[in-house]
Image (cartoon, grey):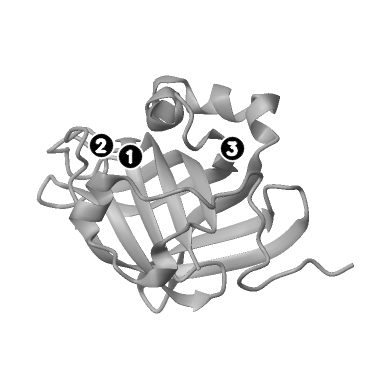
Amino acid sequence: MEPKSGRGRLKPACSLRDARLPSSAIQAFTPCRGELLHPSLLLLGIGVQNYTCDSMGNYSSIGAVATLFDVSCLYDTSIFDSLTLIADDMSSQTLLKTQAIQDYAIGHHFFVGANGTSTPHFVINKDGRGSSIKDWVNAKKLINIPSTDGSQNVDWLELNSTSGELARTIYRLSTAGGQPPSTCTPGNATAALPYAALYWFFE
């Protein structure tokens, strides 16, 4: 049987009918379109932010790699607001090898390159209920704002789809970690810094 794809076919592990963007995100990004009322997916990304050191001694982002976990069943629970901090405090490699969390892994986030550009890419291999899904989206950054939880965390983002049907709009929120030091030594190898974030997908 061919895996399903296309908008409206992804089923999170638990209903997101009552899920709402946090007030801090609403104030920052002012989403007002009707389709942003309810997320289609709510995913925890755990991975690394990748950087290279330029000739001026400044770190420059060269993308990220993360595993995506369905956390829809944790929305509106006591630990939801601390998910990214918990993930960032633990060794990412240890956490990712834990079977309990692997059961909720449904996809990956990484960057793809073409014509000298680097594009955020999200791919889903199954939905939150275990059904075979093959869906993806390439996105572009519209807005970035500093994390409300401290400068040690990578920015919050609003991204819009450029191709693919997984989502029209994606918000990266509640980030933890991933921010590089302010300076580096030119010529040093690339840096891979652990981070975690919540990704809100809207169709």
Residue reaching furthest front?
A: 18
First reached walking from the N terminus: tag 3 or tag 2:
3
Location of residue 6 in the rendering, given as x and y in whole percent from the top left corner: 65, 73
Instruction: Say which amino acid is labelled 2.
Output: Asn
Asked if residue 190 shows in the view, the reply is no
The structure residue drawn at horizontal position 12% and vertical position 45%, both measured from the top left corner, is 57
Q: Mark 1 points at which residue?
A: 175
Local secondary structure at mark 3: helix
Location of residue 83 in the rendering, given as x and y in whole percent from the top left corner: 44, 30
Query: Residue 25: which numbered mark, if any?
Result: none
In three-dimensional space, the C-alpha distance between marks 1 and 2, rounded to whole angstroms, equals: 6 Å
Instruction: Say which amino acid is labelled 1.
Output: Thr
The structure residue drawn at horizontal position 9% and vertical position 50%, both measured from the top left corner, is 56
Q: Which of the two residues, 3 or 31, is positioned nearer the viewer here?
A: 31
* Quadrant for the N terminus in the image: bottom right
Q: Look at discs 3 and 2 and give the one toward the viewer.
A: 3
Local secondary structure at mark 2: loop
In three-dimensional space, the C-alpha distance between marks 3 and 1, rounded to whole angstroms, equals: 19 Å
Kindly check if marks 3 and 2 are in contact, taking CB atoms under 8 A apart as contact. no
First reached walking from the N terminus: tag 3 or tag 1:
3
The structure residue drawn at horizontal position 69% and vertical position 70%, both measured from the top left corner, is 5
Query: Residue 73: which numbered mark, if any?
Result: 3
Kindly check if marks 1 and 2 are in contact, taking CB atoms under 8 A apart as contact. yes
Instruction: Say which amino acid is labelled 3.
Output: Cys
Location of residue 176 in the rendering, given as x and y in whole percent from the top left corner: 33, 34
In three-dimensional space, the C-alpha distance between marks 3 and 2, rounded to whole angstroms, equals: 25 Å
Kindly check if marks 3 and 1 are in contact, taking CB atoms under 8 A apart as contact. no
Q: Name the residue under label 2.
A: 153
First reached walking from the N terminus: tag 1 or tag 2:
2
